[in-house]
Each structure stands twice: as C-alpha cells, then as structure tokens.
Image (spheres, grey):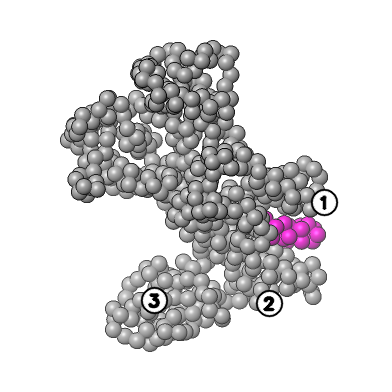
Amino acid sequence: MHGNVGVELGRRVAAAVQDALDLRITAEQAAVRPSKQAGADYQSGIALALAGTLGRDPRELAREVAARLDTTGPVGSAQVSGPGFVNLVLAPGWLADRAGALLGEERLGAAPVAEPRRIAIDYSSPNVAKEMHVGHLRSSVLGDAIARLLRFAGHEVVAHNHIGDWGTPFGMLIEHLADEGRTGAGDELSIGDLNGFYQEARKKFDAELDFANRARRRVVLLQGGHQETLALWRRLVEQSARHFEQVYDLLGVGLTAADVYGESFYNPFLADLVRQLSAKRLVKVSAGAICAFPEGFTNRDGDPQAVIVRKRGGGYGYAATDLATARYWIEERGATDLLYVVGSPQAQHFALVFAVLREAGWLTGDLHAEHIGFGSILGEDGRTVRSRAGGAVKLVDLLVEAIDRAAGIAARSELTDDQKASVARAVGIGAVKYADLSNDRRRDYVFDWDRMLAMDGNTAVYLQYANCRARAVLRRAGGEPAAGTPVLLTDPRERDLLLRILRFPAACTAATEGYAPHKLCTHLYDTARAFSAFYAGCPILTADTPELRASRLVLATLAARVLTLGLSLLGIEAPERM
C-alpha cells in the first residue's frame, strides 16, 4: 500500500462498517483523521456519526466496527476510546518497511490524480503604467503556490495574467504624454516615470474638461487601431512588462511574458459577446446600458441586480471582459476549470459573472469556475499596510528590504559572500511568501517583520534551518542512505517523525483540493518540529549501533526531502547551508 495512509485506513473502516452493520459508506465518510490522543496514530468517528441514525450506543457500534477491521498490513491494532472513537495504531513493521521504500520515491508517496483536468488560473493581474505594490503580493504568491500544487497533483495548468492594459486610463496617459512632448521613440520611460505621469494625468482628467474630452477621443483612436496611438500604447505595455518580469523574478513567481493576457486581448470578442447574449435573450437595455439580470441576485433595494455588459456610451464594463475571458478559455483553449485568485471583495462580481455564464450555456456539465478569494495585508495598526508617506508600499521595495533584513541571518554562517547573498535572498523572499501562505487565505493578516524572520515558530526560516540541519548531518555521514535501508523504531521521537513524513501526501491533497496552501505549511511546520525533537533527542551519527545510525539517517533524509519538496510547492527555496 502506497500513498495516502489515511485514505487506506478509511477504506478499511468502510469495509468493516459494511461487514459489521451491513451499511455502505465511503472512505471519506469513515472520518479517519490523525489522532491527537496518546497511543493512537489515527482515529475514526464513524460510530458517533451513525449512532443517531441507527439509534444505538456509539461505543457498542465502535466495538463492532473495530472487531471486523482488517488488521493486516498497515493496521497494527484497533481499539475503542472515549464516547465511541475507533483508535488505529499503525504496525511497527509496516512503518519501518514503508520508510525504507520511501527513499526510492521521488514524490514521497504522493500519487498524481487519476483523472487530470485542464485548469486555467488567473492571478497577479497588475495594471500597466503602474508599479506593482504590496496589494499585488497575495494574488501573485497564492496563485503561484496553487498553480504549483495543481501541477504536482498531475493537472494541466495554464496560468494567465489578466493585466489591466485597456480603457480610459490609457487615453489619459497617452494624451498627457503627447501634451508633454514625450511621444518620440527616443523618449524612454521608466516605471517610476509612468507612476508620476499617471497621477498627473488623473488630476488633469478630473480638473480640465478639454483634457478629459481629448483623453476620451484618444481611447476611441486606440480602440479603432490608430497607428500612432497604438505605438504609444505598446511602449507603455512593454515598459510595464519589463517591470512585472523583474518583480516576478525577484519574488520567485513563475509568470512570464507568455502568460500575459491583458484586457486588450479580449477586446475583439466583446461585440460578439453582446450579440450572443442578445440572441439568447439574456440582456436588455437599462438606463441606456445593455445589462444582464441573472436569476437569484438582487440589489440593496430588492430589485434585480444588473450586470453591465455594455455601458451607455458604448464602452464595455469589467463584466463583459470577464465573460469574454471565460468563454475564450472554455471554447478556444479547452479549459475544464476556471480559477480566479482575486481579493474577497470581488466575490459578488464573480458570482454574477458565473451565473450569466451558466444561463448562457457556456459553463455547463463538468465545467467548473471558482473565485479563490483572499483577505488583506494589514499593518500593526490593523489597517491596510501603507508606506511611511501614506501611500501604497512598492512591492520591489518590500522585497529588497526583506533580503536586506535576512542578510543578518546569512552573515552568521561561514559561507562565501556570494553564498551569503544567495541565502539572504532565499530566506528573505521565503519569509515574505511563507508569512502570506501560512495564513488561511480567507483571513486578513498582520505584516510583521520580526515574526516572519523569527528562527522559531511557524516561519519559513524555521523550516529552512531544520532542512539545513538535516543536510549537514547527511554531508558528515557521506551522503544519503540507499533505498531499502532497514529502519528501526526504538524511540517515540523516531516514530513521531516518521508519521509526519508519511502524512505528506495527505497534506498535499488537502492543500490542493481546498486551494489552501496554509494546510501544507502547517504540515511542514509539524514535520520540522518533529525533526527538531528527533535531532535533539536521538543521536544520529553517534548512534549505538551501525544499524541504528543508518536507520536514523533514513529519517533525516526523508525529513529533508519533505521540507525541500514541500517548500518548492510553495515557491520557496530550501538552501542546504545557512
């Protein structure tokens, strides 16, 4: 038996329920979970779940299930505890054999899914002509980790970066560039220049009617394919793209220029979208705009909620672009799943878009769309984190500061200067990403430098340091032991560490299926803690016998592999020396 131990135990409990009670349940319904009770490795609450339905004493049901449980292979024993739990203890011989075999498994027991899907995932989505700021961190980091987890699970994952590169803001910016005489090919613009230009253009747009009208006409020229306007627009996009790639490279996020699908990409599809919705009688004119009114949604006044597809002036709203985006990825790219890693305040927007897609017959059957929402990053005052000047914190500045702060940790080691710089980057960037990923994405969290760079507690630094300890032991031992090396479990700390290692597949599954990287973070932290207890209490290189030494090297190897692979699935490096 390989892979997820909990799933196999669930199957056995389900079979025992069938034998004892003549009831069919699934492995998932068997409710097998890791046990926190001393003397038990796993626990099933199935008897408690069935007692009310059957009108029987849960302890009596638990005893009947335990008596019919197959106790060969992984199961050593089954006992009843508490109000009616079935406690399961894994067989020592099976544990030892499984550990030795795991050395030869690159995926550490995590099997790919039987039926992979084609998943289009939208994340990061910055705006052209604006520097990326701390508000882009969560979508970028969460989206990248979720994409990595899905690929590891065996799915085909296509990332698309839905950048804001179209509409009124570009009319404003291009017209302001023209006013300032910055339209020549030799007029290079940095992303910092563009930030300032955008702010100036916005002020003029709000204050000067003539400029606002010219900016709107410029949008019409852009949408109509005016060559000079398009050339200026491309310069803005290209400069911003270079900035985005710089940030993604520093952050260790896998998005590239090939993943960019801006709003402009979908612009040619919008007119047909309106025609199709009109033909399906799903839109009507409301206050001059063409709107859809999906069933089941009302506004604050109790009236049907409008989804603006085309504005009164002829322009298209965000909903139209998102509808066209979904239709493109389903019909043209064959996606079975559409995932959107976007802040939680957009929940209703996506619910409305998905409803229109279903009513139009574009999101049907086995096709799935989901908004993966997330909370905000807060400062110590409990408000959205801001710079000292009160503006948005630039993402590059934050990442550079993380590396600078982490340099203090790297400076303590006996590494070369280049190695120290590499470690500082891995530790600093890892700290920022892990602080985000280790929190339930649905909740806000407080950005705290001291906490995220702490050498103890649930931090990336703690995990990276535990891995380095294990790697150092293996270097001193002359390398990793061979697959099949016998494992001896002579100390409770050895057994606890091995149990954590064997639960890695289950942690990956939970994190992937729930789009919840924090579940993998929790498992990695538990594994690192178990390794630290093992490292402190069980001599490895100076073990009493050569056999015990080899056995403990197996556990150190597996712990390091779990931490390294797990961190890589989060997009975090695991240095071998710190």
Residues at marks 2 and 3, CA–CA distance in whole angstroms:
31 Å
Name the residue carrying label 1.
Answer: 414
Please state the horizontal and vertical placement of residue 47, each as a whole percent of the image. Answer: 38, 79
Q: Which residue is mark 2?
A: 491
Give 68 or 80, whichever is nearer the viewer: 80
Front of the two marks 2 and 1: 1
Q: How packed is label 3: few (under 14 Cα within 10 Å), some, or many (20 or more)? A: many
C-alpha separation, residue under disc 2 versus residue under disc 1: 34 Å
Res. 228 visible in picture? yes
Tell me the kind of residue under disc 2: Asp
Residue closest to the eye, 476 or 532: 532
Q: Quadrant of residue 191?
A: top right
Please report whichever mark, 2 or 3, sits nearer to the chain's N-terminal start: 3
Secondary structure type for disc 3: helix
Residue located at (40% from left, 18% from top): 211
- The residue lying at 49 percent from left, 40 percent from top is 124
578, above or below 526, in the image? above
- The magenta segment is 464-483
> What residue is shown at x 44% (from left), y 54% (from top)?
442
Label 1: state its secondary structure. Answer: loop
- Pick whichever, 208 or 76, lies toward us: 208
Q: CA distance from mark 1 to mark 3?
A: 54 Å
**Of the residues under marks 1 and 3, which one precedes in the sequence?**
3
